[in-house]
Structure formats: structure tokens, C-alpha cells
Image (cartoon, rainbow, N blue to C red):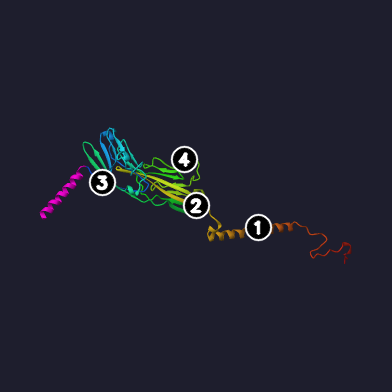
Amino acid sequence: MKLFFNALAVTLFLLYHVESGFGSDKVAVSVKEGDSVTLHTGVETNQQEDIKWYFGSTRLAQISGDLSFICTDVQCNAGTERFRDGLKLDHQTGSLTIMNTRTTDSGEYKLKIISSDDSEKIFSVSVTDVSAAELYEMKEGESVTLDPGVIKHPNDVRTWCFNDTLIAEITGDQSKICTDEQCTHQYSELRDRLKLDHQTGSLTITNTRTTDSGLYKVQIIISDSSFSITTVKRFSVSVTAVSDSDLPSAALAGIVVAVVLLVAAAAVAAGVFYCRRRSHTAVPPNEDDDGNSPPAPNNIHLK
């Protein structure tokens, strides 16, 4: 019996390594719901390969090397509409793109390349729920940093939009970096108030205004030799005007002091003006300092 189990273990070991030896490998891909993901074949169809894609046991797409036969989803399987209008097949490379992914798209996608050297590749795709747009609330004049929270890789491309208008962009090799009017070539309300972090790809809006309220979106394209992911993250920004009740107590105290000083200065100015008017008023000649009239010169008796 022990000999039997040893032989079985050796057989399973050999089967596993024989299967792995024919070019079969596995790639794990994780995306958010609504993202698009491209699964790369790594070959060119002009090499006369016959490429087939499967989801489970269902054939999703197929393309022959001479392009004489091409099908995707419903075309490959009449009556099935699982990925209706959600698949795109690259006719040059045979790579498969799954657009607007859903959690139900999670699973294993198998690639079979039939040629003189047959090979298989499995992509384990995991689609997770996407969270609602992140909400940022602030007072006018404050700054806010919108951070996608996605680790930036050298080849990433990040594009920022405000209400569907391009406001910032950075390419993977940083050959193209622009913000606001540099991207749109026209004046914008955000002029000179945007800062793009070249290391993290995050976007900072300084000295915010109420007109900055709206939806900000960043599209991130992550490329790899085995797959590419296009993901979009949303930020809802709300900027409210500053009222007197929002001012700090210290600021209010400062305003009160300023008002008091202004009133005092006005009073002093009025006093100076009044004194100057008095200094220019002549004393009547017919009165002395006591208010009595001086005696007539003819009435003065000489001793």
C-alpha cells in the first residue's frame, strides 16, 4: 500500500511538471468594477498562430494567423450574450480587452496559442466593487489634494479632468506634463492654482473657489508585458463661501480692535480740526481776558 501511494505521488508530480513544461503559466490581475483590462498574448498574428480565448469552457474569441477567421463572444457562440459588446479583439496581436468590467466577470481566462510550439496561458481576473466618488468638502481659500491612492509606476499615464475638461496630464516617461491652460491652450478658472505631483500623480488645488466645485476624474493606464489596465477614479469637490460666522474668534477680535482704532483716529482727527479752527479765531479788541471792556484812554488819570 505504501508503495502504491509513493507511486501515485510520483505520477501526480510528473503530470504537473509535464503540463507546466508546455509553456503554461498563470497571471493574476485585479481590477475595480468599471475598469477595462487588456490581456496580452505577446505575439503577432502574422506569425500564423491560431489564437483562442476561453472563459471557463466557453470560447470567447478566436483569430487565425491569416485573419481568415475572427470571432468574439456571440459570434463564437450563437445564443450566448455574456460579454455582449464588452469584448475587443486586437487583430494584430490577438490580445483581448474586457471593457467596463463587472464583478461577474471574475474568473479564469485561458489563452491557447496553436502553432508549431503550442502554449497556454491563464489569466486569473478578479473584479471588485468600486466605491462611490470620494467626497471633499472645504471652505473657500483652502487647499485640497486629490490622491488616487494607486502606486505610480514608471510607465503609467495619468489624465485629470474637471467636469470632462482636461486639466492635467502626465505620461509614463514624463515626456508630456501639462496643467490647466497648458493642456487646453485657453484660460481657465483654475489657472496657476494646480500642482501636479510628478512622483505620485496626485493633484493639488490651491486657494479654492466656489467655482472649483464639481466632479474631478483621473484616468490611469497601467501597462505590463502581460496585461494593461485602464482605471478611473472620481472625486466630488464641494467648496462653500466663507461667512462672518466662519471666521475664527481671534480674527473677529482683530476686526473689533481695528474698528475701535479707526473710530479713535477719526475722533482725534476731528479734535485737531476743531483746535485749528479755534487758533485761527481772533479775540475781539473791545474785550480783555476777563471779558470786560478796557477803560477809555481819556479817562486814565496820570499821577
The residue carrying mark 2 is 239
- Image position of 199 with respect to 254: above or below: above
Judged by depth in the image, the label closer to the viewer, 1 or 4, is 4
Q: Which mark is residue 26?
A: 3
Q: Amino acid at mark 3?
A: Lys
Q: Which residue is mark 4?
A: 184
**Which kind of residue does numbered mark 4 sit on?**
Thr
Question: Which mark is first along the chain, 1 or 2?
Answer: 2
Q: Residues within 10 Å of mark 1 (few under 14, many from 20)?
A: few
17 drawn magenta: yes
Q: Is residue 261 left or right of residue 80?
A: right
Mark 1 and mark 3: span between their CA atoms? 84 Å
- Distance from label 2 to label 1 (Cα)? 39 Å
Callout 1 amino acid: Ala
Quick one: SS at disc 2? strand
Q: Is residue 23 left or right of residue 247?
A: left
Quadrant into which the N terminus falls: bottom left
Q: Give above or below for 185 relative to 286.
A: above
Q: Magenta stretch?
A: 1-22
Indicate left or right for 120 with 262 as reference.
left
| SS for dot 4 | helix
Asked whether, in this view, residue 254 is left or right of residue 41, the answer is: right
Which of the two labelled residues, at mark 1 and mark 4, occupies the earlier sequence position? 4
Whether label 1 touches label 3, CB < 8 Å = no
Q: Residue at x 25, y 43 (%)?
A: 121
Q: CA distance from mark 3 to mark 2?
A: 47 Å
